[in-house]
């Protein structure tokens, strides 16, 4: 109660509550939309219409899927660790709203004004690894165990080039506040950070695909090798939550990417939240395009791509950034 | 001594003129390992082991061929079933490793034992059914071997005597595993996991990949012992879709057995159709008109393209690319529509008949084929651009699952597998059947022996099949005869006595249907030689010590059709 | 530790995440059928009864990668304050210091590379 008394900003509290409610709606709607979009994109890339039966052009397919998933029995496998097993999907979903809070969606449109926003996102995004590890270990399933081991090795490995790429931007902007990073970029594409830091952008993009376990880096759930990887045993909504969390994380990485490299909500002619959403969806569509185009890499290849190429590249890039900042 | 053996093998009398040629040698069972050693040194490949039960005992026939010189040798050995006991042969599984599974299969079906076999477990039958010996006949139903073949010239001839000097060259069979001498460990799991000969090291996962696994393409099961991501030992377990087609072949007339062929290999049904009609036509001396032969080639090659397309899509699915299979199915759909016009069915075709094919294709077939083939080159070029040249695909298949020619010979691998290992061994060119000798096509060969080589061989084969189809389309308007020979017998005719073996090149390799008839209403024995069976048998050796992902890639590159393996 | 506004925001967001995840799970508990018996609860091993427990100490080939990560991640964290403050205090001395730090990191990668941690044999015997 003492702590609450310290609060002298009821306006911030209102903002937080409104933001959380809006984010709940945002994640729910966009999660559904992305599930639908992914299947439609996959369909059109594969020269078929995709979902077409539920509603006009199948737009209610995601709703039908969600209802179906809710209607499925939650089966706990024999010998599984109940707490870890059912804790995992919840833990994987837990940080999602937090990751959105510091992001500035439009001019002044943010949930939490925090000067270490970038650090907050990077710190809590790591919670997903714990969830995957819990799921794999708690399932009492060998495929899940292999998937979890892969997930941990992959996610932690790609965190480093990701951090190094982000650091280059942070060094340039001199801040970890996402709003200020946007403010330092201009409206036109050549004024965005991507023009100044193309290497960091490339590294960040590769890491964003790898961190969200998307093909071609979907090793933890590589279904042709590990049946379904860490979520082999999850029925109905257990799987659904992992699925939704994955999509929510995709939105987060693309939102952070758009903020850091693509000028956030700034764009030619009229600035605003639509530019931000447009950039997020463009990013997501490219990720989908890649997923439905490429085969999966092998596990040693994915780790070595990180350690032999991305990390040295990111280190050099960071060094060059520091040198350039010192010289200029 | 060595020279004597060579002579005895070379000078053995020919018993039956087979279209593939080859020498027939009759041996004492005890001489088999020596003869096998000799033939292996010659570069022979063990195609198949056919066991047949006669009144005199069980006969084991070993079909060997040299994929390089195209020589063929068939070893016959007859062992008596002493008073209802088992006929005994020495194992040759330590000489030709491919014989391992053939012998296990024979032990499932017949009262025979192969002494010294390292893992005498049931292969296709369920463990609880293993005493039933489904292909064994009651004593009064057994025919004499002499009604089937004129063995009189060789039986009793001292063909085994000169082979004795070879015994010191025979490798000793591997020791039988402790499981079989000391009994089973008291462990959970089913029959096969308990018999799985784990290396016994600690910290290893023993894991079932299959029968319900996305990348085993059906109900194949592989027991794995994993050290982290590496496979220490892999042991395929078969029989989950075993339907005893060979017994069905004995229970009905040859014509009634024709529809079964589409169920053996549902992806290249017409190849199997062709093998059966070839065998019966050889046995009964039935002629086929030119037009019918052309129709056969046309449909078989179309079917080969559709089979390869499905493999292509499914293989990329194994490697994690989801889209190519849809593109492959796009083309495959066209082929299935076309084959529906010709054969009337879409997947399990039964089009070939003894003496021709069942009917003329419906109108629009030839035009449709022409349109398809004209556009197919562009499609292949697109597949090459989109998929084959992809760097991730290259990295996943290059240098993966390498098998050299020696592995192919020891296990009897044929088809694109041996062609990817550097030998242009294709039955269509080796022992041309039908009218293949009159067409201009090349046999794609790669020397690397890895998954990429097999991939590229299959991609090139599609182009070659398209070339053959183009030539057939040109020839067919002027071809002589109708779709069926006027003197062709009724399809349910009774086969004359004798043995015949139809050998064709199907999409997955050498397919042979061996028909043994004693003049009864139904064939006395129907032996189906499946290429996938032999191609898969090398998996345990090839995948040992590789990464799990590489093993999946290797498995996919073998192009397995599980119903064909299990029959 | 001072309990600040930020902590409340974090806890509220995490709590919303848990609630958002818990709601459909609770819905499943209420709506879904309750079948039991047979092999329903058998761990999935491609349809076969599992042979042995997965909870063994099994060899992970990428164990070294995890160690390497640990070393790196801690070091990279130090770079955050450096990066934020760098533009204001950039000078040659600072540049040399940062270079030394980054060179140490790069040498770490090189050392492990040289040690063969990144080499995966195609086949183990």
Image: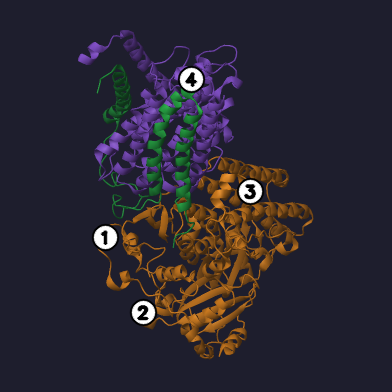
Q: In the drawing, does residue A3 fall left or right of residue A149?
A: left
**Is residue B457 shown above or below A226?**
below
Q: Which residue matches tag 4? A: A181
**Mark 1 belongs to chain:** B
Query: Are marks 1 and 4 in one subunit?
Result: no
Which shade is chain B?
Answer: orange
**Mark 3 belongs to chain:** B
Return the mark for residue B339.
Answer: 3
Secondary structure beneath dot 2 equals loop
Q: In the drawing, does residue B521 fall left or right of residue A9?
A: right
Q: Which residue matches tag 2? A: B85
Label 2 close to label 3 by CB (< 8 Å): no
Distance CA(mark 1)–CA(mark 3): 51 Å
Front of the two marks 1 and 2: 1
Work out whether residue B29 or residue A150 is closer to the camera in this orientation and state it. A150
Distance CA(mark 1)–CA(mark 4): 62 Å
Residue C115: tell me if it is visible.
yes
Secondary structure beneath dot 3 equals helix
Binning the other alpha carbons within 10 Å of mark 1 as few (below 14), some (14 to 19) or many (20 upward) gives few
Query: Are marks 1 and 3 in one subunit?
Result: yes
Q: Position of residue C29 (x, y in %)?
A: 27, 30
Q: Which residue matches tag 1? A: B187
Which shade is chain C?
Answer: green
Label 4 close to label 3 by CB (< 8 Å): no
């Amino acid at each position: 109660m003492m702590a609450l008394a310290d609060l002298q900003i009821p306006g911030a509290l209102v903002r937080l509550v409104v933001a959380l409610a809006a984010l709940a709606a945002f994640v729910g709607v966009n999660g559904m939309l992305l599930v639908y979009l992914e299947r439609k994109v996959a369909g059109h890339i594969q020269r078929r219409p995709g979902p077409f039966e539920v509603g006009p052009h199948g737009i209610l397919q995601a709703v039908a899927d969600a209802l179906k998933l809710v209607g499925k029995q939650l089966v706990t496998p024999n010998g599984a660790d109940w707490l870890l097993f059912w804790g995992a999907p919840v833990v994987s979903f837990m940080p999602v709203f937090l990751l959105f809070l510091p992001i500035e969606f439009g001019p002044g449109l943010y949930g939490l004004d925090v000067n270490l926003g970038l650090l907050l996102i990077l710190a809590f995004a790591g919670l997903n690894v714990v969830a995957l590890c819990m799921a794999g270990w708690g399932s009492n399933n060998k495929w899940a165990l292999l998937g979890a081991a892969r997930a941990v090795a992959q996610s932690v490995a790609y965190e480093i080039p990701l951090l190094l790429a982000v650091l280059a931007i942070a060094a340039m902007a001199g801040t970890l506040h996402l709003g200020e990073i946007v403010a330092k970029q201009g409206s036109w594409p050549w004024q965005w950070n991507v023009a100044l830091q193309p290497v960091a952008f490339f590294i960040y993009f590769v890491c964003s695909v790898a961190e969200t376990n998307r093909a071609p880096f979907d090793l933890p759930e590589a279904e042709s090798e590990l049946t379904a990887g860490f979520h082999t045993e999850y029925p109905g909504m257990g799987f659904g939550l992992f699925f939704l969390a994955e999509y929510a994380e995709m939105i987060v990485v693309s939102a952070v990417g758009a903020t850091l490299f693509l000028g956030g909500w700034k764009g030619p002619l009229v600035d605003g939240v639509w530019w931000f959403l447009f950039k997020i969806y463009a990013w997501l569509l490219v990720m989908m395009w890649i997923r439905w185009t490429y085969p999966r890499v092998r596990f040693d290849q994915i780790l070595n791509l990180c350690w032999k190429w991305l990390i040295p590249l990111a280190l050099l890039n960071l060094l060059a950034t520091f040198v350039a900042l010192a010289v200029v | 001594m060595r020279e004597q053996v060579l002579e005895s093998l070379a000078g053995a009398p020919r018993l039956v003129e087979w279209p593939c040629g080859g020498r027939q040698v009759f041996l004492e069972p005890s001489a088999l390992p020596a003869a096998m050693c000799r033939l292996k040194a010659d570069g022979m490949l063990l195609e198949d082991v056919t066991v047949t039960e006669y009144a005199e005992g069980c006969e084991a026939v070993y079909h060997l061929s040299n994929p390089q010189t195209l020589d063929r040798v068939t070893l016959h050995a007859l062992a008596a079933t002493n008073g209802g006991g088992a006929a005994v042969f020495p194992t040759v599984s330590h000489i030709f490793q491919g014989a391992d599974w053939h012998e296990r299969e024979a032990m499932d079906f017949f009262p025979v034992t192969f002494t010294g076999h390292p893992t005498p477990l049931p292969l296709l039958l369920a463990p609880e059914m293993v005493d039933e010996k489904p292909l064994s006949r009651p004593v009064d139903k057994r025919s004499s071997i002499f009604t089937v073949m004129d063995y009189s010239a060789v039986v009793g001839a001292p063909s085994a005597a000169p082979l004795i000097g070879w015994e010191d060259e025979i490798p000793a069979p591997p020791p039988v595993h402790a499981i079989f001498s000391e009994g089973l460990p008291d462990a959970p799991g089913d029959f096969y996991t308990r018999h799985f000969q784990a290396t016994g090291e600690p910290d290893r996962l023993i894991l079932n990949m299959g029968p319900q696994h996305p990348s085993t393409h059906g109900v194949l099961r592989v027991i794995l012992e994993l050290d982290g991501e590496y496979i220490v030992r892999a042991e395929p377990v078969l029989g989950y879709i075993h339907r005893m087609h060979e017994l069905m072949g004995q229970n009905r007339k040859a014509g009634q057995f024709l529809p079964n062929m589409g169920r053996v290999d549902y992806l290249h049904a017409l190849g199997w159709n062709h093998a059966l009609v070839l065998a019966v036509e050889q046995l009964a001396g039935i002629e086929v008109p030119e037009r019918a032969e052309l129709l056969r080639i046309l449909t078989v090659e179309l079917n080969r393209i559709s089979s390869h397309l499905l493999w292509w899509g499914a293989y990329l699915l194994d490697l994690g690319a989801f889209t190519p299979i849809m593109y492959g199915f796009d083309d495959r759909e066209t082929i299935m529509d076309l084959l529906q016009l010709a054969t009337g069915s879409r997947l399990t075709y039964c089009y070939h008949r003894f003496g021709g094919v069942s009917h003329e294709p419906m109108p629009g077939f030839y035009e449709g084929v022409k349109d398809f083939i004209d556009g197919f080159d562009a499609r292949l070029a697109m597949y090459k651009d989109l998929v084959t040249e992809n760097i991730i695909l290259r990295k996943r298949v290059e240098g993966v699952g390498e098998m050299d020619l020696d592995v192919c010979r020891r296990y009897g691998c044929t088809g694109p597998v041996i062609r990817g290992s550097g030998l242009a061994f294709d039955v269509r060119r080796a022992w041309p059947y039908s009218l293949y000798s009159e067409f201009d096509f090349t046999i794609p060969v790669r020397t690397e022996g890895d998954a990429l080589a097999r991939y590229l061989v299959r991609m090139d084969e599609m182009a070659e099949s398209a070339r053959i189809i183009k030539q057939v389309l040109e020839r067919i308007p002027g071809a002589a005869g109708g779709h069926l020979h006027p003197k062709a017998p009724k399809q349910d005719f009774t086969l004359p006595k004798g043995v015949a073996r139809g050998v064709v090149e199907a999409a997955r390799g050498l397919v042979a249907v061996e028909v043994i008839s004693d003049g009864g209403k139904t064939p006395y024995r129907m032996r189906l030689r499946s290429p996938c069976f032999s191609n898969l048998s090398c998996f345990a050796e090839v995948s040992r010590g590789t990464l799990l992902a590489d093993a999946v890639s290797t498995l996919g590159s073998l192009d397995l059709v599980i119903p064909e393996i299990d029959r | 530790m001072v309990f600040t506004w930020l902590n409340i925001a974090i806890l509220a967001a995490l709590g919303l995440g848990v609630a958002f995840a818990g709601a459909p799970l609770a819905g499943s508990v209420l709506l879904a059928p309750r079948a039991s018996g047979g092999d329903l609860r058998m761990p999935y091993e491609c349809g076969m009864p599992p042979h042995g427990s997965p909870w063994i100490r099994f060899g992970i080939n990428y164990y070294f990668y995890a160690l390497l990560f640990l070393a790196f991640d801690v070091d990279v964290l130090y770079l955050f304050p450096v990066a934020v403050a760098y533009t204001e205090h950039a000078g040659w001395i600072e540049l040399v210091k940062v270079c030394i730090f980054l060179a140490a990191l790069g040498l770490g990668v090189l050392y492990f590379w040289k040690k063969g941690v990144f080499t995966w044999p195609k086949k183990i015997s």
